[in-house]
Image (cartoon, rainbow, N blue to C red):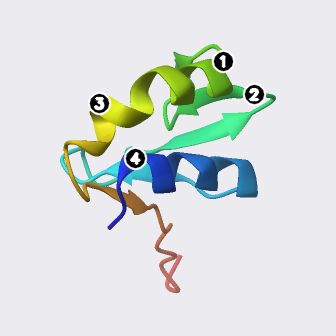
Amino acid sequence: MFIFSKAFPLLKKGYRIRHKRWPDLYFITLKENKVYDSSGNLYTQDFDEYFDKNSEVSDNAGHVWEIYYEIMDENL
């Protein structure tokens, strides 16, 4: 688990991240400096602005962010 300021930059490295209280298959991902959720909805218009404005407050929530790993079913 990560704090926000450590997890959010992982989006720029291609990772998908999720908050531990979100549904299991829900995550956010980065595309062209915009953050989208797993349903294709815009989560935030500007990655850098959102990160700068929310890091300090979101870090206070503690280690609640995790990397989303897609589980592949070998029987499909």
Q: Quadrant of residue 10?
A: bottom right
- Tell me the CA gap for discs 2 and 1: 6 Å
Q: Residue shown at 42%/35% (left/top)?
A: 55
Residue lying furthest top = 45
Q: Nearer the viewer, mark 3 or mark 4?
A: 3
* Residue 20 versus residue 32 in the image, above or below: below
Q: Quadrant of residue 66?
A: bottom left
> Cβ–Cβ below 8 Å for labels 2 and 1?
yes
- Tell me the CA gap for discs 1 and 4: 16 Å
Q: Secondary structure at mark 1?
A: loop
Task: Work out whether mark 3 precedes mark 4 in sequence or the reverse, and give the earlier one.
Answer: 4
- Tell me the CA gap for discs 4 and 2: 17 Å
Q: Residue shown at 24%/54% (left/top)?
A: 20
- Tell me the CA gap for discs 2 and 3: 21 Å
Q: Nearer the viewer, mark 2 or mark 3?
A: 3
Number of other residues with Cα within 10 Å of mark 2, as a class: few under 14, some 14 to 19, many 20 or more:
some
| Amino acid on which disc 4 is placed | Phe
* Residue 43 versus residue 74 in the image, above or below: above
- Tell me the CA gap for discs 3 and 1: 18 Å
Q: Which residue is mark 4?
A: 4
Number of other residues with Cα within 10 Å of mark 4, as a class: few under 14, some 14 to 19, many 20 or more:
many
What x and y, as percent, mark residue 42?
56, 17
Marking on residue 46: 1
* Residue 19 versus residue 67 in the image, above or below: above
Q: Secondary structure at mark 3?
A: helix
Task: Work out whether mark 2 precedes mark 1 in sequence or the reverse, and give the earlier one.
Answer: 2
